[in-house]
Image: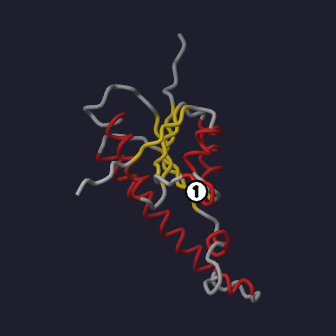
């Protein structure tokens, strides 16, 4: 008798409201008690940036000056801050999963660039679906900043669902 493993859904989160909305959307549509019985294993992944990448993008007059001067004194503080952010996000995701009956969800923090971390998570977990939020950047911002969702749509070896948060009409 053959056993069938449930397909895996990976959801990428960061501190943006768009990614939290994407997680909430996925939970509402695939895991909540009223949702169709699709039976996914859920893996929520947060890509924690390395401290040097955060300090390095600060520009002139910011934390980069301490690295330039050779001291690098701010890196431990930045690392502590990034770990606190990651812990808070994982706790928020855990509470969301519990409230939507997504028991058994795996919650992971992986250091690195979000584009690579999410594509690697898809491979590691043999995911069938990757869910990411969309910041709604235009073509110029996407070109300058790089779009995680665009990168994943082109490089992840699974279906990619890009969830856009509706704009408020007030």
107 vs 54, nearest the viewer: 54
- Residue at 45 percent of width and 57 percent of height: 90
Specify how the rendered protein is coloured. Answer: secondary structure
- Residue found at the very far left of the displayed protein: 170
- Residue at 68 percent of width and 86 percent of height: 65
Whole-percent x, y for residue 75 in the image: 64, 79
Please tell me whether residue 70 is drawn above or below residue 9 in the rendered image: below
Please tell me whether residue 41 is drawn above or below residue 71 in the rendered image: above
Q: How many marks?
A: 1
- Residue found at the very far top of the displayed protein: 1
Quadrant position of residue 112: bottom right
Q: Neighbour class for label 1 at 10 Å: few (<14), some, many (≥20)?
A: few
Question: Is 71 on the left or on the right of 106, as rendered?
Answer: right
Viewport quadrant of the C terminus: bottom left
- Residue at 50 percent of width and 54 percent of height: 137
Please tell me whether residue 30 is drawn above or below residue 81 in the rendered image: above
Quadrant position of residue 154: top right
Whole-percent x, y for residue 76 in the image: 62, 79
Please tell me whether residue 128 is drawn above or below residue 19 in the rendered image: above
Look at the numbered disc 1 and give the secondary structure of its residue: helix
Whole-percent x, y for residue 168 in the image: 28, 54
Residue that badge 1 annotates: 140
Question: Is 97 on the left or on the right of 159, as rendered?
Answer: left
């Amino acid at each position: 008798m053959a056993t069938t493993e449930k397909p895996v859904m990976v959801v990428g989160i960061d501190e943006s409201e768009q990614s939290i909305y994407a997680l909430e959307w996925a939970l509402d549509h695939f895991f909540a008690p009223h949702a169709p019985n699709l039976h996914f294993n859920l893996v929520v992944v947060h890509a924690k940036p390395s401290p040097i990448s955060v300090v390095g993008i600060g520009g002139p007059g910011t934390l980069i000056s301490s690295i330039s001067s050779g001291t690098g004194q701010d890196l431990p503080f930045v690392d502590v801050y990034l770990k606190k952010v990651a812990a808070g996000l994982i706790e928020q995701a855990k509470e969301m999963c519990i409230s939507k009956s997504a028991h058994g969800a795996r919650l992971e923090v992986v250091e690195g660039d979000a584009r690579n971390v999410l594509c690697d998570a898809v491979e590691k977990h043999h995911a069938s679906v990757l869910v990411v939020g969309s910041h709604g950047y235009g073509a110029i911002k996407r070109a300058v900043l790089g779009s995680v969702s665009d990168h994943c749509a082109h490089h992840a070896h699974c279906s990619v669902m890009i969830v856009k948060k509706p704009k408020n009409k007030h």
